[in-house]
Amino acid sequence: MNSFDDFLPSILGQVVRWLGVNAPLYLAWLAGIVLAISRWRRHPTVSLLTLIALALLLLSSVVGVIVFAWLPHVLIDRSSSIDLSVVYSLVGLVLNAIRAAGWGIILVALFGWRTPPPVAPRYPIPPSGPPMRR
């Protein structure tokens, strides 16, 4: 049985590579977090929801990278009864559920507090009240 220290360099290398590949997405999410914080006073509810959603997306992605790099090394020494595909599917399902919640919160932030524009009348409305004298 191998120790965790034997796998640590391999795990760290994978994590750094995968984080690097995802860096543009992380930068976009971080920019969104900064914008949400900077607009907090003007739109507190939308900013809060955006902040929560982007934090969920960022954390689920980073945690997913670490878990998917770490899992094979942990499960490789376990008994053969553990089906790796089932474990990966369950982890993927949980992470995708968290990401879907994040996107749902973003949609609520975008469309949840919008008031409909005033409806213009189809035809002119006659003035109310007594007729004006000339």
Image: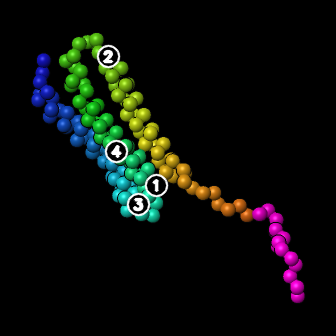
Numbered tag placed on residue 40 in the rendering:
3
The residue identified by callout 1 is: 45
Tell me, yes or no, whether the highlighted magenta stretch contains residue 130. Answer: yes
Distance from the alpha carbon under mark 2 to that under mark 3: 47 Å
Of marks 1 and 4, which one's residue comes earlier in the chain? 1
Magenta residues (range): 121-134
From the image, give the main secondary structure of the stretch colored magenta: loop
Residue that mark 4 sits on: 58
Q: What residue is drawn where x is 82% and y is 72%?
A: 128
Between 117 and 84, which is closer to the camera in this rendering? 117
Q: Earlier in the sequence, mark 3 or mark 1?
A: 3
The amino acid sitting under disc 1 is Thr
Residue under numbered circle 2: 83
- Foreground tag (2 vs 1): 1
* Closer to us: 20 or 122: 122
Q: Secondary structure at mark 4?
A: helix
Q: Nearer the viewer, residue 133 or 48?
A: 133
The picture places residue 5, in percent across and down from the top left corner, at: 11, 29
- Residue at 23% over, 30% down: 70
Element at badge 1? helix
**x, y percentage for residue 109?**
49, 51
How far, Cα to Cα, is label 2 from label 1? 44 Å
